[in-house]
Image (spheres, rainbow, N blue to C red):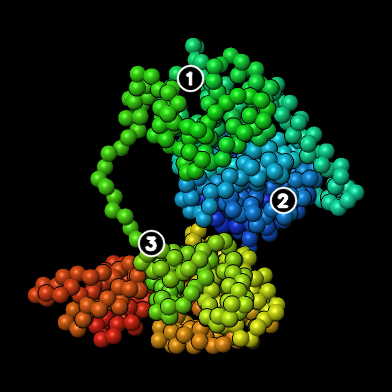
Amino acid sequence: MDNKKLMTGNQAIARGFYEAGGHVATSYPGSPTVEIIDTIKRHHKAGYAEFSVNEKVALEVGIGSSMAGARTLVAMKHVGVNIAADPLMTFTQTKTKGGFILVSGDDPGMASSQNEQDNRLFAKFANMPVLDPSTSQEAKEMTKLGFEISEKYETPVMLRITSRLCHSRSHVFIEDRIEHSIKGFERDISNFGMIPPYTFDKQYHMKDRILALQKDLEQDAISLNRYEALEDSKVLIITSGLVYEHYKALELPYSVYKLGMVYPLPIEAIRKLSKTYESIIVIEEMMPFIEDQLKLAGIECCGKEYFSFTGELDIQDIRAGFEKANLLKNDLSHQALQSHDQTSEEVIGRLPMFCAGCPHRPVFDILKKSKKNVIGDIGCYSMGILYPLEVLDTVISMGASIGMMKGISKAHRLANKNESLVAVIGDGTFYHSGMTGLVNLLHQLDPEENMTLIILNNATTAMTGGQPTASSGVYNQSDDMHVDMLKLIEAMGFERVKVVDQFAYKEAKQIIDGEIAYKGLSIVITTRPCALKYKIKEPIYYVDPSICIGCRSCVKTNCPPIHMKAYEGIDKLKSSIDPSMCVGCSVCSQVCPVNAIKSTREEA
């Protein structure tokens, strides 16, 4: 067997979990870490893995398995830690039994996120050590080492990885799995019963384990940090993560202290080193986390005055920072930088678009025509806030749309405004954190408030690659949760709930418009599954240019196969459908006012 393979950072973490004898892995799908559980489920089936309904539940399942002595990994994107914060902040007080790693996928530059939260700060807040890998190989090794640290120091460990490292590939050496036994849950009230008086001692436990870990780092008892000394260097660079690899590509003549663990820091070791250098430069993405720790310890350094506090730091950014600091002499690094520059033709920007056959499109077309305020949520449908759709008015966080709609409605009532409001939420987000907001709508419900909630039930977490939701089993026998959303909502106490097939466009428009006009609270559940996940394809449609009037009603549905083009012998642009992209959803045909769009089924 070839013992070296190309792996993404995510795949390497999954491999590290396997090689370390990992037992239980949980997650809620969120970019950039979604591939970790996918990889474990597909390729490393020695333990148990699941996509939970949200991050809090994923963490709670992980807490239980760790308490039973199982080596446990819980993965989520950076904002997911906010959802899991309540149990996390108490769990970190306990003495960890089975090794526990929390993977946080941070997203500098917000490639797939609504903010740029730096979870190194969160880990310090929670008294957790933080590992920060630079390559896929390090991601694997730090996963394995993280379990050992967790068990030795009786602490959860955060493995912090950023989007680019999650998805980029580098070589990883493959090793065999080492099995670890599970001792099972043993009653320990003083450790697991986190209420006073037991919690008082735990504050000292958290402090002591960090100090013990820090002491071992100082003495190099744990091989995580690396000092790369260069003769005659008057500058010491301190950095970590993928930024280290970008810095090294510049081939600058400065010594480097490369951190593998960014909290706690080996302060005394760094203090000793600092005395041999004229200056210390800290290079890190986002917040000045390392820089602030050094300054608080009285170690003079700088960093953020040269490097941005937001976005990724690529090779050009780091070079620009050194130019600003006057640390590039005789155009050092120019040749190295040139080797990384790639000249190519300008890439034409692509508009955000739903997939061909996406069941969200007819709903958004109906809502745009309604000209009502629409409160958005997190999912594929978040694209509805952007051009050319521009249907949504807000996008904040998972499950927030329902509570926000209520808040706006209450404020409007106080101001004697009686405007109708619409909120949209997907089924994955609904089960994740929307149900509590929905139940809260019943609290002090004013029958005069005009609120309409549309639940886009496409039976998948489509935004992150098609992971299951609690309703997926209704459409897909391979998924084991078969929640009937209508029965669930009715059992909560909601009386006015309509179910629509949004591909029956005219009927769906009539129902949605009617519910928006209804004075009171109403809920609409759409029923078509994700076309991409379920590979739905019907007989395709085509345009008869002799009938088409060029009104662009079909184009405005924002369907990828539809565009305007010139036909031979016809002066005016008419619509056209790319047959290789069409999946036969029929929405374009139904919105066409002159029946110019026809199905190939009719010709068969």
The furthest residue to the left: 569
Of the two numbered discs 2 and 1 on the same chain, state the one appearing first in sequence: 2
Q: Nearer the viewer, residue 31 or 6?
A: 31
Judging by the rendered image, the residue that carries numbered circle 2 is 88
Q: Residue at x 67, y 70 (%)?
A: 436
Q: Residue at x 19, y 69 (%)?
A: 565
Amino acid carrying label 3: it is: Pro
Distance in Å between CA atoms under marks 3 and 2: 36 Å
Quarter assignment of residue 264: top right
Distance in Å between CA atoms under marks 2 and 1: 40 Å
Quarter assignment of residue 290: top right
> Which label belongs to residue 137?
none
The furthest residue to the top: 232
Amino acid carrying label 1: it is: Tyr
Of the two numbered discs 1 and 3 on the same chain, state the one appearing first in sequence: 1
Badge 2 density bin: few <14, some 14–19, many ≥20, Cα 10 Å: many
Q: Are marks 2 and 1 in contact (CB under 8 Å)?
A: no
Amino acid carrying label 2: it is: Leu
Of the two numbered discs 3 and 2 on the same chain, state the one appearing first in sequence: 2
Q: Residue at x 70, y 43 (%)?
A: 125
Q: Classify 381 as above or below 89.
A: below
> Which label belongs to residue 254?
1
Judging by the rendered image, the residue that carries numbered circle 3 is 352
Q: Are marks 3 and 2 in contact (CB under 8 Å)?
A: no
Count of numbered labels shown in the rendering: 3
Badge 1 density bin: few <14, some 14–19, many ≥20, Cα 10 Å: some
Q: Classify 256 as above or below 109.
A: above
**Residue 527 coordinates in the image, percent (x, y):** 50, 78
Residue 216 appears in the rendering: yes
